[in-house]
Image (cartoon, rainbow, N blue to C red):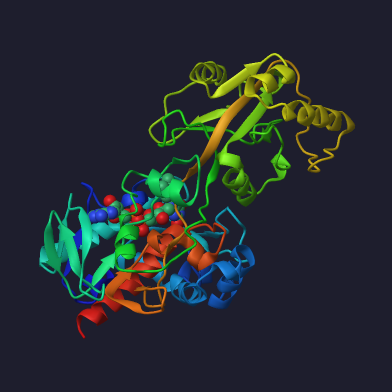
Amino acid sequence: MRAAELGANVLTLEQHHRVGGSANTAGGSISGTGFRAQIAAGIEDSPEKFYEDFVAMGGEENMNTEIAMVHAQRSGEAIDWLEDYVGVEMSDQVDTGGYLTMNTNRVTYSASGASSGGGLYFVNALMDKLQGFIDQGTAQLALEAMVTDLVLDENKDVLGVVVDGLEIKAPSVIIATGGYGYSEKWLKEFNFTNITSNDPPTAIGSGYDFARAAGAAFDNMNYSSCYGGSVPVSGFQASLRANINYPGAVWVDQAGLRMFSEPDATSMDKRTVWRTAKDNIVYVVVAENMIKDDAPLFTGMMSNSAPFTTQEKLVELEDQGYVFKAGSIQALAEMLKMPELVQTMETYNKDVAAGKDSVFGREKDLAAFEGPVYAVYTVPYLMMTAGGPRINGEAALVREDGSVVQNVYIAGEIIGSANIAGHNTIGGIGHGLCATWGRIAAENAVKNAGK
Ligand SMILES: Cc1cc2nc3c(=O)[nH]c(=O)nc-3n(C[C@H](O)[C@H](O)[C@H](O)COP(=O)(O)OP(=O)(O)OC[C@H]3O[C@@H](n4cnc5c(N)ncnc54)[C@H](O)[C@@H]3O)c2cc1C
């Protein structure tokens, strides 16, 4: 969009039958600093403060410090541009955006807010604006046009792309193909033993293959954030979530050991528990006395919205082998071949009686396990990947030897949130990467095309 605004002739190639990718199902948050709504709310902020939050929450050693500072500097104007130029309807709400709390409120929302559907406001406005350029003849959009390769010269610099075996040459190429959150192969190669995805099937990570072919270096590929509690009833496609904070529940790993003071876990702690558990398998254990009709133990995700009760789902999942029900902890431990579970729960029950968890200091929600017990088999799910090819402040791909791949720029999730903000998740970073780096990539691609 920014390239068309700057006067370039733009060809957009989209593998799917509609544009928008993850934003079609995403929430509407976006983060930045110095944008109008933040100033209007009287919030004092600066790129330096944004950068300091990246360092404090994500670790400077994990970041590409050059692009982190550029992101901090240019993220605010990108939000204003979305509203003023593209015409995205925005709310005036500004807050911390959940996840890890930044020191300053700098997350805002499209007009429909944080919930699913907010991302469509970005997609629809961008599509309307692009249509204007298509109508005036300076932009083209090809749907169901899968790019399979880059066209490279002998130095592995970029000359164009390949679609359907056809080489399309261009003075500049922008790769905005998203993350690899729907590539089970990549997720298992780099990040997880067991994983499910709440990404749309468009997030196949092909841009990573393109960047690799051009010799780009990669950073933070071994890091990916995730959410806990997916019950993998639909294989890789996440469709059912256990309520991991169910009152009274404890989490145990495959050895039968607890991992955290469950009710005190921040959203980041929960991600870490599921990311680092052996084989990414965590059992959510509850007892019959804890299950209440008005507190659902399971929630459907994405395509799975048919109503069900907790008891119905427990029976169904037991049949499918995702719930293990036993008359006692001993019987459950035998069923799961988890001898340590007996000791874990004996200690826990004693601690409950004493009113203090001696292992993790849990004080909230201490409830004795009585009656039949249930262990729900869960793995993580994700909505976004965090590693990506190395770039410089102009969004150009960089190789391990520091040389810049010519004529190609990247934007969006493929940049990798960890390369900007380290090992954490902050609200609105996904859309922030699209808007901020979409503009930077386009500006440099246009400049490069005119040289
Ligand atoms: C359920 C959900 C909720 C989310 N909520 C938020 C939120 O509230 N705030 C936030 O900041 N982030 C959120 N995110 C993350 C955010 O939506 C994404 O990071 C962002 O939309 C990624 O945009 P992108 O354009 O980089 O990639 P994508 O959205 O993946 O788009 C890439 C596009 O490129 C196309 N493509 C891929 N490969 C090829 C190829 N080889 N040839 C042609 N076309 C190709 C794809 O079909 C797709 O349309 C959420 C994500 C999900 C899944």
Q: Position of residue 327 (x, y in %)?
A: 70, 13
* Residue 129: quarter of image: bottom left
- Which of the two residues, 274 or 363, is positioned nearer the viewer here? 274
- Which of the two residues, 438 or 191, is positioned nearer the viewer here? 191
* Residue 362: quarter of image: top right
> Could one spot residue 54 in this view of the protein?
yes
Q: Position of residue 347 (x, y in %)?
A: 82, 31
Image side of residue 204 versus residue 306, left or right: left
Residue at the (86%, 34%) spot, across then down = 355
Q: Work out which quarter of the rendered image holds the C terminus and state it.
A: bottom left
Q: Work out which quarter of the rendered image holds the N terminus and state it.
A: bottom left
- Which of the two residues, 394 or 122, is positioned nearer the viewer here? 394
Q: Position of residue 293 (x, y in %)?
A: 61, 20
Query: In this view, which residue lies farthest toward the bottom?
Result: 451
Asked if 66 appears above or below 337 in the picture, the reply is below
- Which of the two residues, 114 or 191, is positioned nearer the viewer here? 191
Image side of residue 186 versus residue 266, left or right: left
Asked if 409 appears above or below 124 in the picture, the reply is below
Residue at the (20%, 61%) spot, across then down = 12
Asked if 412 appears above or below 366 in the picture, the reply is below
Residue at the (44%, 74%) spot, across then down = 74
> Could one spot residue 383 in this view of the protein?
no
Image side of residue 354 versus residue 192, left or right: right
